[in-house]
Image (tube, rainbow, N blue to C red):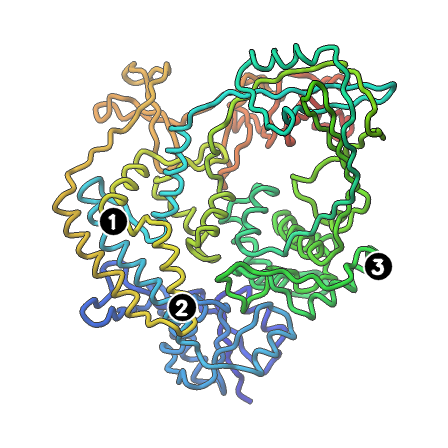
Amino acid sequence: MSQSLVIVESPAKAKTISKFLGKNFKVKASMGHIRDLPKSQLGVDIENNYEPKYITIRGKGDLIDELKKEAKKASKVYIATDPDREGEAISWHLAYILGLDISEKCRVEFHEITKKAVVNAIKNPRDINMNLVNAQQARRILDRLVGYEISPVLWKKIKWGLSAGRVQSVAVRLICDREKEIREFVQEEYWTITATLKNGDRVLDAKLISFGDEKLKITNKEQADEIIKRLTGKIFYVNEVKKQERRKNPFPPFTTSTLQQEAYKKLNFSTKKTMQIVQQLYEGIEIKGEGSVGLITYMRTDSVRISDEAKKITRDFIKDNYGTEFVPSTERTYKSKGGAQDAHEAIRPTSVERTPDRIKNSLTNDQYKLYKLIWERFVASQMADAIYDTMSIEFESENYIFKSSGSILKFSGFLSVYRTDEEEEDKLLPDVKEKEEFQPVAIEPKQHFTQPPSRYTEATLVKALEENGIGRPSTYAPIITTILERKYVERDKKFLKPTELGEIVTELLKEYFSDIVDIDFTAEMENKLDEVEQGKENWIDIVDGFYKPLKEKIKIAEEKIGKIKIEEKVEETDIKCEKCGRNMVIKSGKFGRFLACPGYPECKNAKPLVEEIDVLCPLCGNKIIVKKSKSGKMFYGCSNYPECKFASWYKPVNMRCPKCGKVLYERKQKDKTIYFCDDKECGYVEEK
């Protein structure tokens, strides 16, 4: 009996699906795209309605031959690529290569890799959706036209190898604009005043908020001192006491964007790493006792919708595992943002019964952390509100109004499963009554200065891109990867900072190709691509409307822009070159900063830039240096490697454990510094 052939993108996905379909099906992987535009030329026939000239991707010949062979033998061919524009385009290319009739129903679509979803999809194949294909084609051609038409202008005018991108250039502009805000920020001084008030054994702090009904703005020490002088020795009267109950709603389940943001904040995962791991969780992991299992629903989504079945199962799970009081009276429904593709669900576990701890031993550490984050956020999203008892007390003295606020968690609700770093700590205020008198124990002024806006991190950049309608869930991670690789942006600790090159290119694009870096224009183009997907717009018209004015701007730019020279900044050190005696300088290269002789090309001496810390190796007494792992994570190691194998993710410090005398290590935790002994038998820890 002949088998049906099912084609997916990856071997992991193929392995998981094979288990569900049985011996009457053969599942093969296309290994992603099999056709694309050529790299050596534009690959778009501008004179013929922007017809793309697709070619087989190099190295895919043997794979295509194998797929053709299997397709000829098969009684039926199903194409089960991912349920989005990119997946639909891969399906279309596969159908073309294999000579399938696209009017026949050969496309199967599922949003989670579970037996029920896969079997149901096979029973209900559909046509290839050409609206989805055309939306992907239009994006690919627009990106190609921008990259291949503008980039040569940058090569001629600035330096070889630069590139412009329809979406990446807007991302760089956001980072450059933020840097400009920071540079131009004018710091302002302001003061706050806090009174410590006492009545018997009741003591509390209250902040000055106004003078009568007038909001106070204290801009210098003299003003603050004058207010304190007027209040010294005066009685503070309780004006008003407010007690109320406050409810806090749970967060919606994750979209691609919110998962990337939270994984960055909570787990310190880059957007790229998050997407790599979440792809593994979706396609299938070998779970002990179950085999290969898809653990989560499709991970490229901007929807927060949850299926009715998943909600019901989760409510039952919460009732059984946490109690009836943790189940809200009505099912929770979340509203997706305007423009969200609601065909997908939010990112959730395929089975809520598959708890993180139950499958921990089958996952890598990073897979476990990310799965746990997704599982907890989803379960919490269907739980009851957290309830706080809150209290605020208003004091008055000499017409100055002070306020003290406190709250205590009365019912944890969803917080018993999922918390953010922003959760407030309990602060219980003493019982007071109106018109009671309090004496000031202390009235303390504090100087502050307004702060410039913070640079973007990967998380806040993703948030800004989403809020501005730039890109789509599948593009956030590649955008950040690209702008870092192009050296338009660099990392400064956790922050993204524009390089001189990034700022020069952005200013040039703003002047000569304003639409390319215009946030509203780029967002509108995303909306038009969505309309192609919905069948409301013709993709050729959109490309044509974009390209014709672009071509005119390229002509003007080539005529008007002169050669721009970028002076490479070098930082001189006091380290002598062993070959010629000059002071070596710090330069930047493909793999980061390094030491080089300024006498190049006569002297070609170069060596790694080593950062030492003022601590000696606890094993051999040599200097400890800062190193980077292959993944770019910083750690501390002995300068005498490989003779000495000392290495630690945590920074050793010049402090000894008071219990066992070994070196202590340092780690940061929110606003605290923790010093600990790494000897498990000792276990010494102190906070500062």
Looking at the rendered structure, the kind of residue marked 3 is Thr
Q: Tell me what residue is drawn at x 66 percent, y 16 percent.
A: 655
Image spot of residue 112 (x, y percent): 60, 67
Looking at the rendered structure, the kind of residue marked 1 is Phe
Q: Tell me what residue is drawn at x 87 percent, y 18 percent.
A: 200
Per the image, the residue denoted by label 1 is 513
Residue 361 relative to residue 601: left or right:
right
Per the image, the residue denoted by label 2 is 531
Between disc 1 and disc 2, whose residue precedes? 1
Q: Are marks 3 and 2 in contact (CB under 8 Å)?
A: no
Quadrant of residue 175 within the rendered picture = top left
**Residue closer to the observer: 281 or 514:** 514
**Residue closer to the observer: 648 or 541:** 541
Between disc 1 and disc 3, whose residue precedes? 3
For label 2, the SS is helix
Between disc 3 and disc 2, whose residue precedes? 3
Per the image, the residue denoted by label 3 is 324
Question: Label 3 crowding class (10 Å Cα cut-off): few <14, some 14-19, many 20+?
Answer: some
Reply above or below: 393 against 309: above
Q: Are marks 1 and 2 in contact (CB under 8 Å)?
A: no
Image spot of residue 401 (x, y percent): 68, 25
Question: Label 2 crowding class (10 Å Cα cut-off): few <14, some 14-19, many 20+?
Answer: some
The dot on residue 605 is none
Reply above or below: 32 against 647: below
Tell me the quadrant of the picture where the N terminus can be found.
bottom right
